[in-house]
Image: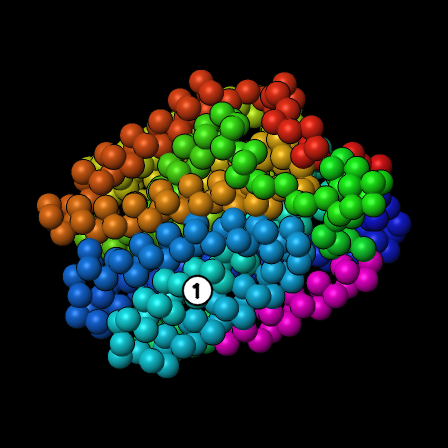
Amino acid sequence: MKPAASSPSSRHLVYGLVAVGFLVMFVSTSVKSVYQVYFADLATHFGRGRSDFAWSGSVFMLVTGLVSPLVGSLSDRLGPLRTVVIGCLAAGAALAGTSLFDGSLPVFVLGYGLLAAFGLAAMTYVPMGVLVDRLFEQKKSGLAFAVVTNGTSISFIVLSPFWLWLAPKASWETTFLMVGVFLALPLAGLAWFAAAKSKAAGLDAASAAPDAETATGTATGTKAAPPRAWSVLRRDSGFYALAIGFMGCGASMAFIDVHLVAFWQDHSTPRGLMGVSLSLLGVLELISGLLTGWLAIRLPKRALLGVFYLLRSCAVLLLLGASEDLRTLGFAVVFGATYLGTVVLTSMFCMARYGAAIKGRAFGYLFLAHQLGAFASVQLGALSHDLWGSYQPYIVGLATLTALGGLTSWLFLRDPRIEPEPHPGLQPRPSA
């Protein structure tokens, strides 16, 4: 652990903060899950076709990416947990607001597509990556990040079947309001309490130790300006390799978030089988996240990342199978084995390559690429369904993109241990 967490009391607090991060990730998935489960009902409610209404999901995906660099900057400067508080309040207000003003599609698009998107970005991967980076030394950060983000895996196991069960019994307005109130009150309050505790213990400081450039500025009596993240990233070929793969990651995850249930419904898949498949997806997501954190310490990260992307491409192609079991259980097994692996490995590359000064913003830019892929995926999937009455052309394109991510990782990335340093002042701080 970092020096601030060397005492027993600090270690207990660190574990508590990890638990809070896990819980936030667990609950935050509901922002997307309720939209996924009620997608067809929402389109009918607003009198739109799927491709027309899918713009709300497309805007959500795009805005989540566009605000990710901003969220990274907030995490760097305000602290990750205070950023999470802001996200909980924003997402809660968005879901509650859209449920109360349920007769207006523009209100829904603005509330869900803009405010909820910002809220989700401020609650999940970017601030959690910064939090883990501040709590753990680099060697342990990958496994710790996998533990925190496995909140999404448990959510697939527990909450996804629950939302599927609830959908026929409760209107989307009731469900959105219920989730919104929970986010804005108890979850935001818990995150605020954790932020206060971590600040008092010195675990959530914006700069627990000075970087090289900051130290130089202090020595000369001037305050060094924070480095411009994009000026560093745009000259780094490794960033582009990570971004291309992460774009395919976002596109494939967006398929699950928006189109997977609708795809299964088009094939008259039994609701029980859908629930079991989503739960299986979550179980394997949990295992893959932890296993990835463990393997990344022992095996070349570049090879692992490439394998995960190629496996994901194979999983997507299983959706074209004639067997119902292949389209559901088979897809869940193969895709679930890769689900968090790409996120954990991309985070580890980012942590190793960029230091505390720009780590949050660098991860934010990678999530921008992730969400650009998601944005295109949501709309192209709906367009494929409306034009051809099938997701098949879209699925072929999705499989091609994820396979390209694997090839890009193998060809243009190198293991972080031998990567050239993009900027001497931006490397990770040494641990005690």
- State the residue in front, 104 or 70: 70
Circle 1 SS class: helix
Find residue 430 and report its image quarter.
top right
Q: Is residue 243 left or right of residue 102?
A: right
**Colour treatment of the image:** rainbow
Q: Position of residue 381 (x, y in %)?
A: 24, 47
Q: Please check the rendered image and state whether residue 183 is part of the magenta-colored stretch, yes or no.
A: yes
Name the amino acid, label 1.
Ala
Q: Is residue 249 magenta?
A: no
Name the one closer to the observer, 283 or 60.
60
Q: Main secondary structure of the magenta part?
A: helix
Up the image or down, 281 lies above or below 425; here it is: below
Q: Is residue 92 visible?
A: yes
The tally of labels here is 1
Residue 45: x and y in percent read 22, 72
Magenta region, residue range: 181-201
The residue positioned 54% from the left and 70% from the top of the image is 89
- Residue drawn where x is 81% and y is 55% of the image: 202
When the figure is inspected, residue 237 is found, relative to residue 213, above or below; the finding is above
Question: As drawn, is 73 to the left or to the right of 18?
Answer: left
Residue name at image x 42 percent, y 43 percent? 370
Per the image, the residue denoted by label 1 is 116
Q: Nearer the viewer, residue 296 or 103?
A: 103
